[in-house]
Amino acid sequence: MVRLSGAMASLNQTSSKPFDSAHLTKVIESSTCGPAGKVTAIRFGTVIASRLARQADSPPGPASLSDCTGVRQAHTGARMEQTGVWSPNRETAIDIEATLGHGRSRLMCGRFNAADDPLNQVFEELVGHPFPGEPNHNTAPTESAWIVRQDAPGSEELQAIAATWWLTPYWSKTPKPKYATFNARAETIAEASSFREPFRRRRCLVPVCGFYEWQKDGGRRIPYYVRPRAGGMLLAGVWDRWRSRDRTQSITSFAIVTTRVTPKLEFLHDRQPLMLSRGGARQWMSRDATESDLDALLEPCIPIDLSVVPVSAYVGDPRNKESRCVEPVAASLAIDRDVH
């Protein structure tokens, strides 16, 4: 497992340039080292990080920094059909692309894994019972997922509830917004019309086993599974309830909050979901949280130790829900939590 820790030094190699192992070796040798010669300041560029994780002749397992000069491609499979913005189906893709275009920086966190192991323990801690849902190793926007919210307005008690991952604001004229609302940007969440009221009054937790991100590598998009090294992961979310005018239809839905990316994950994307520590989760859900408390939580951070796992193109089809989605195809990368 390749470990990325400490401050990240700049590596001036972009995805448009060919892979240069000699250049990478030089960067590693010139990186800041501690007293014992331990490299503490390494940052892998986009292409280098992806290729480092794809070992041609080795099964998934630990890798070392010395492997960097012997990297060969092994991450094969059909070319992904994703655009810069993930969409759950062709119909929705038209709406999203018309609204947001194909820019990589616009949205992220378009798939996550929710299964009973390790979420049973997470739900036991939060609401006193195991994960109530069915395993879905490839949860996509517009699908139902289990979130944790306050049991009643102003209450400190929490409850688990199934909700649609695509927030429909309470004031919407239709149950299906024509714009993408499965992510809420931390920078604008307090002002955006769809999210400002939920942010003030209806924050929630989205317990997951991990999330997927696609990294652009030339003409391909390479899927990675980002998961905690131990236990489950808590993502920050906001929820809302929409009702039809005649009160015959009701939809409870949510969005996952995203932030600017931290340097340790920027080789994957320029944004990341807002991950919370257990203490941060309590503060996120507290009715006594101040504006400054919430502002601090919205800052980019990695509060838990992570593994970034290369997975197969199988996960690219949202109809595939089996555990095969998370099976590694090459060595994983270890990302250490931020220390404050």
Image (spheres, helix red, strand yellow):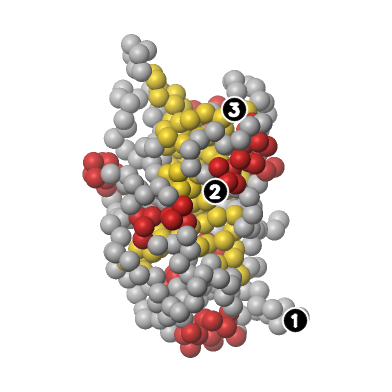
Q: For the residues labelled 3 and 1, say whether their Cβ atoms are less than 8 Å apart.
A: no
Asked whether residue 88 is in view, the answer is yes
In this rendering, is residue 127 above or below 312? above
On the image, the x and y values in percent for residue 74 come to: 40, 74
Q: Amino acid at mark 1?
A: Ala
Give the distance between the C-alpha atoms of the residues marked 3 and 2, in whole angstroms.
19 Å
Q: Residues within 10 Å of mark 1 (few under 14, many from 20)?
A: few
Give the distance between the C-alpha atoms of the residues marked 2 and 1, in whole angstroms.
35 Å
Q: For the residues labelled 3 and 2, say whether their Cβ atoms are less than 8 Å apart.
A: no
Quadrant where the image shows the C terminus:
bottom right
Q: For the residues labelled 2 and 1, say whether their Cβ atoms are less than 8 Å apart.
A: no
Residue 303 horizontal side relative to residue 262, left or right? right
Give the residue at the far right of this rendering.
Answer: 35
Q: Residues within 10 Å of mark 2 (few under 14, many from 20)?
A: many
Q: In the drawing, what numbered circle is on residue 216? A: none
Quadrant where the image shows the N terminus:
bottom right
Q: Amino acid at mark 2?
A: Cys
Q: Secondary structure at mark 1?
A: loop
Q: In the drawing, what numbered circle is on residue 36? A: 1
Q: In the drawing, what numbered circle is on residue 209? A: 2
Q: On the image, numbered disc 3 is attached to which residue? A: 159
